Structure formats: structure tokens, C-alpha cells
Image: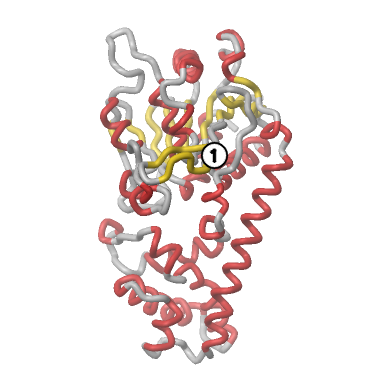
Amino acid sequence: MPRIAYLVSSAREFDFRDSANHPTGYWAEEALKSYEQFVAAGADVVVMTPDGKAPVADPYGLELIFHYPDEDRDYFASVYRTFHHDPDDIRITLHHITGQQLMAGRRIASRLVDTGKSPAEAHEIVSKAAKIAWAQDRLLVDVMLADGLDGGLPEEALRSAVEELKAASQALSDERKAKLDAIEDFRSPVTLSELSDEQLAEFDAVFAPGGHGPMVDLPENPDVSRLLAILHAKNAPIVSLCHGVAMLLAAPERADGQWLFEGYRMTSFTDEEEDQNRLGQLGMPWYLDSALKNAGAVFDDAPFAWASHVVVDRNLITGQQPNSTEATTAATLKALDL
């Protein structure tokens, strides 16, 4: 049974340039999905924080816009891929995903099918309207109503699809928060600073989920440095996701004086993605992807923002942002032969 050091930030405040002492913590979706999948696969998951304090979920990460059901996300992906043949030409921002009703496409298509349209016809209607909304910064429902793309659906049916998605997203956020609150390991984590080198060597991997919290208490942390050095020496998987990749900045120098992960390919929450989210717009004191590059990383991000992206280089596994949770977790399980 592989033993995973599940390293979670216990930070509760983050100082942005325009908002000091802003509430922060770990990212709920990343933490819950990965934890549950590791446990289901049979791993011994030991939740720990640097100081032993119970971690808290980042309030921003609990907002409904970050908890769209997977089936709605997948349908949206099938829609925006029709915008261009080359994914390098697709620019999807957080505003497109959360502010233009585009994620309601699956539910609108379902209503179109109920009126007699085939699934392919419904997808074509939604995709055409979504492309106009995407390009012109308009709401999807407004485009369908004003541009003759309603497919015969009344306004009430279109708007009810949006409200249905909102309700489903809020329910999913509430469910995830309740599950995290019920996990004893999160309420009473192990204290990393109290573990000896011998105890750290008993772990087979380390995994750090994101949220802005990791940028507060993981970089330059001497105990995180010990953990990384010990696991790297035994070639154990070192895994981090989103802002959790900040833990790598605690890695010590090699014998040649270079950063432990100098020259490694890796990814993280990007500067572009940071500038698109509401918290990042409060003014970042420093940017994670820039810091990794400056440390010596070979940065490898997705062709466009918010796409799922995981990078594996030797024993180092990194995921770009919350949409990369499943891929990063799967890569970790594969590395552990689970």
C-alpha cells in the first residue's frame, strides 16, 4: 500500500497588493477529488500541514462558478472546439467560462432535443450561438433570442436552463464542502515539522493541491525542503497541482549549487490565468509561473488557458490548474502502480 504525504497549506490569509489579509486556503475541488481517488485506489493518504493546523477551504474556490458538473464541462469543451480547427487559435478566458452562460449549453441542447431536434442538430445550434457569444462578449441566451438561434425554444426554457445549471453548481459546491468538513484527516492533520527524516523517508510520494494558500506557507519552508530532498533522493513521485506547485520553490540546492529541479519540465497556474481571476486582479505580490522560470524550470503550459494539462518529467508530476485535477491524480496513480 503506497503511502502518500498529502501536503495541504494551512494558510488562512493572503496579502494581495490591493487587499491585505484576504481569506485564503486550499482549493476544495482539487483537494477532494484527488484525496478521494487516492483512497479509493488503496493508497495510505496522510494529510499534513506545515504547522499541524487544520487547513481551510479557500472561500473563492467554493463559489458556484468553480463547481460546474463534469457533464456540463465536457459538453462545453465539445462546443468550443468547434470555434477553430487549431486549438492554438482558441482563446478561452475565465470570463467566457463563467460569465457568458456558455456552460449551460448541454442543458439548452437537451431542451432542443425534447422539441424534436436530433442531438447533432441541437449541438450545431448551441455551437453557432456560443461562437457568436464568445466572439462578441454577449450572453448565450441573449444571442439565441436576438439572432434567431433559439431553435424554437421559448425564452423561459432558455433562461430556466441557466438557472438549473446554477442550482446544480451550488449543490455540488455545498456537497464538496460538506465532504471535506467530514474528513477527519483534514480536521486533524499531521504536523510536518514534527516528522523526523526517518519518518519522511517512509512515504512513497508527496502530493500538494492548490489554492493561493500554498504560496504563503510552502515556499522557503525548511520542512518542505526536507521532505522534497528525501523523497527526491529515493526517486519517489513528487506531485503538485495549480498553486500547490509553489512547494517546489522550497527545494534545496543540488551539489552543483543549482536548484533541485533546475532544468525539469513543469507547469503550474499560469500568469495569464492569474490575471484573469478575480483574486489575481487584486494584485499579485509575485507570480508563480514566473518564479518557477526564474528558479530554473522549463515551463510547459497548455496551448490555451484553463485547458487540462499535466506534465511528467522523471519523478516530477505537475498539473496546471483545477481543470487538470483528474489528469494529475491519474498520473500519480500510474507512477505508484495503482
**Vertically, is 220 above or below 177?**
above
Q: What percent of the width, then of the height, locates residue 148?
A: 39, 90
Q: Nearer the viewer, residue 38 or 227?
A: 227
Q: What percent of the width, then of the height, locates residue 292?
A: 32, 31
Residue displayed at 50% across by 92% down:
152
**Vertically, is 76 above or below 133?**
above
Q: Residues within 10 Å of mark 1 (few under 14, many from 20)?
A: many
Residue 210 shows in this picture: yes
**Vertically, is 107 above or below 39?**
below
Residue displayed at 32% across by 7% down:
255
What's the coloring here?
A: secondary structure
Left or right of 113 in this view: 130: left
Please give the count of numbered marks on the rendered protein: 1
Looking at the figure, which quarter contains the N terminus? Answer: top right
Left or right of 289 in this view: 59: right
Looking at the figure, which quarter contains the C terminus? Answer: top right
Residue wearing tag 1: 25
Q: What percent of the width, then of the height, locates residue 326?
A: 52, 45
Residue displayed at 61% across by 34% down:
55
Residue 87's quadrant in the figure?
bottom left
The secondary element bearing badge 1 is classed as: loop
Q: Nearer the viewer, residue 336 or 212?
A: 212
Residue displayed at 73% across by 34% down:
184
Residue 235 shows in this picture: no
Residue type for callout 1: Gly
Q: What percent of the width, then of the height, locates residue 317?
A: 44, 32
**Vertically, is 79 above or below 265?**
below
Q: Nearer the viewer, residue 126 or 171?
A: 171
